[in-house]
Image (spheres, helix red, strand yellow):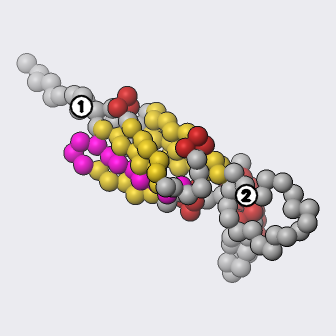
Amino acid sequence: MNNELASNLNQLMNIGDGFFENFGEPFFTMDSADNMKSDITETKDGYQVTVDIPGVDKENIDLSYDQDVLSIKAKRNSALDKKDEKQNVIASERSYGEYVRNYRLPDVAGDKISAKSDKGVLTINLPKAEKKETGHKIEIG
């Protein structure tokens, strides 16, 4: 919904010169791609996904694999959980909230996926499943 709202607002404000092209974008979207940088490698035996998730405890990471899609959901809590009543904060640029990334990785043996988190880096190993025969030629007699 947030992305749709920002997109509609951008279309409304686009008067041809591009001045308002990204108006409202930072307010309505939290780009998970910017907050969860990743590398994906593939071998004949599987995939390895490495994701930077600094400041996220492993208890706040949810991984799932369904219909060829690996989903990563991470929640980073705010460092300023309560209102700064003394107004000591001069600037607060660190991002927090929920971030989601999805990767299409086909033919994975879902029951053999493993993951570990170490020093803000999440590493997920996804072994490939044995190839299933998807079709064959039928001779007409």
Helix, strand or loop under label 2: loop
- Dot in front, 1 or 2: 2
Q: Main secondary structure of the magenta part?
A: strand
Residue under the image location 15 percent in, 28 percent down = 137
- Which residue appears at 63% of the width and 47% of the height? 75
Q: Position of residue 44 (x, y in %)?
A: 21, 45
Where does residue 39 sit, x and y in percent of width and height? 40, 57
- Compare marks 1 and 2 and give the one earlier in the sequence: 2
Please identify the quadrant where the C terminus is shown: top left
Crowd rating for badge 2 (residues with CA inside 10 Å; few <14, some 14–19, many 20+)? few
Residue range corresponding to the magenta coloring: 43-53
Q: Is residue 45 magenta?
A: yes
Q: Up-down: is 34 above or below 66?
A: below
Quadrant of residue 128 in the image?
top left
Seen in the picture, residue 14 relative to 79 is either above or below; the reply is: below
In-front residue for pair 70/79: 79
Q: Which residue is mark 1?
A: 130
Residue in front for this viewpoint, 9 or 95? 95
Specify whether residue 14 is in view.
no
The type of residue carrying mark 1 is Glu
Residue at the spot x=39%, y=38% of the render?
A: 114
Q: Residue furthest left?
A: 141
| 3D distance between C-alphas at marks 1 and 2 | 45 Å
Which residue is disc 2 drawn over? 79
Q: Which residue is drawn at the image coordinates 23% and 32% (left, top)? A: 131
**Dot 1 crowding, Cα within 10 Å, few <14, some 14–19, many 20+:** few
Amino acid type, callout 2: Ala
Instruction: In the rendered structure, find residue 95 and report the number of the disc placed on it.
Output: none
Expressed as whole percent of the image width and height from the top left, the position of residue 73 reads 57, 44
